[in-house]
Image (cartoon, rainbow, N blue to C red):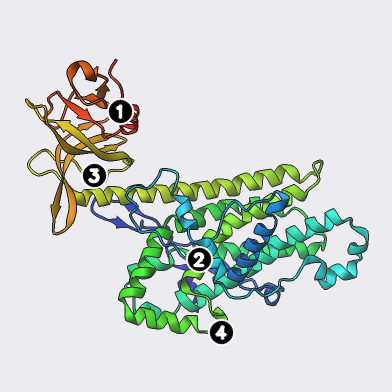
Amino acid sequence: MDQCDCANEDTGGHDESSDSLKLKDSRATDTAEEEELNVFFQSKYINLFPLYQDYCVQAERDDLNQQNTGFVCELTIPQELQTPIIDFCVAEDKGFQLLSIAANACLASAPPVRGSTLWQDLEEVKASGLLRRLPDRDIRLQELMFELIGSEVSYLNSLTIAVHHFYASKEVKQTLTPMEHHVLFSNICQIMAASNKFLMDLEGQLEENVLISQVEDIVLQHCSEFHRVYVPYVTNMRYQETMVNQLLQQNRDFLHSIKNIESHKDCQRQSLKSFLVLPFQRITRIKLLLQSILKQTKPDSDSISNLEKAIAAIHEIVTECDRGVRKMEQIEELVYLDRLLDFGKIKSVPMVVSGRFLVHQGPIRQRSVGTSCFSSVYLHLFNDLLVISSKKYWFQHAGFTVMDHAEFPKHVNVEHVQTELLGLPPDSFLLHLSKNHTGQPTTMILAADTTSDKEVWTKLLPCKQ
């Protein structure tokens, strides 16, 4: 493995271009980071812990076992993502959860877990006599803090395999374009460098005093770096997963080279996908470990304040990852709709615009001018635009022919009507466009299929007083 080559890898990201989704040009890793990668920290506990994939299996099982005591794992950990790149009806709060789908099935099929060393099993701990003097609560607290260290050992070990065997493989690189390689591995080298520095500080503290303390201070010191490297990686995971699936299905040379690497003894029967999902697993797990440490810490302890700050800082990183995933989903929807919407001869508007996202969409009926008949139309409501269209079909694929559009909410409002007096279907209402695509005002009678559909639209669209 050429670690200088690894250190020069760019950070993953996405460009909100109306033409296509591309990875953002990322900041190159600076010289200091390259030097730190070349001086790789070797943990003294490297042979005591399993790969992080195995650790996650055991941690998940432990979480489930503790449910009866009131502790429920907040996040499940996936090995594979089964959702398509476009979920046309995705709920607004679904983004980050998509990265946790199919976790239980993957964990159930994972290989057996090797045992991990406990703090009380360390020779230096036994020699110190602390086990005879410390109360059980303090020993449990030490075990939790040592789990933070031991799990980081497992994590860095797995990251090292991911980088040395998969990322740096010349055979793999020969089967991919530079862009494919970049999308596939994103900024995993920078994440490995961050883990390397984090573990070095954690173990350094343990070397100074076998009675572990102030791990929350070390977490806080590294949170800015965690934010820099984890947010772009997790944000790009949906694209990464799509890329993996496409390559495994369509690129035989890639499939052959990956299977060869996965069969290497260092990989311990773990798949490429299980290595690529490591950063998502880790950043969510750190938060859970800190919360467990906080629960075991005495209320009057001096460390309470910084523990809470560390938890809040990690939570903000997870939240930012969530925002990034949602933003990418919104861009995906815009790109998808851009392909489906045909403006024909009317004035067109670009779909993929920075800050735009789909709010709601669905079929509705419009009363034809001069008749009592209703025809089916389709509404796409964005945060800044309303598009009215009719469905069209070509080559067994559905699309939409745009009939009208207006700036939202500036030129859009609805008005309730007395349907019985006007002889209209019960779930009818008026849609006013004060300025449509031609710049003229227009009004149309719309009827929802159900009362609940009408309520949704009339709540989303501003009501004319």
Mark 3: which amino acid?
Answer: Met
Q: Please tell me which residue lies in front, 86 or 278.
A: 86
Mark 1 vs 2, N-terminal side = 2
Q: What distance separates the C-alpha of mark 2 from that of mark 4?
A: 20 Å
Q: What distance separates the C-alpha of mark 1 from that of mark 4?
A: 60 Å
Mark 3 vs 2, N-terminal side = 2
Residue 158 to residue 407: above or below:
below
Marks 1, 4: nearer the viewer: 1
Mark 2: which amino acid?
Answer: Gln
Q: Residues within 10 Å of mark 1 (few under 14, many from 20)?
A: some
Query: Circle 3 is placed at which residue position?
Result: 351
Query: Circle 4 is placed at which residue position?
Result: 265
Query: Circle 2 is placed at which residue position?
Result: 79
Picture coordinates of residue 341, whole percent (x, y):
18, 46
Q: Residues within 10 Å of mark 2 (few under 14, many from 20)?
A: many
Residue 431 to residue 315: above or below:
above
Query: Circle 1 is placed at which residue position?
Result: 461
Left or right of 67, for residue 21: left
Q: Please tell me which residue lies in front, 143 or 113.
A: 113
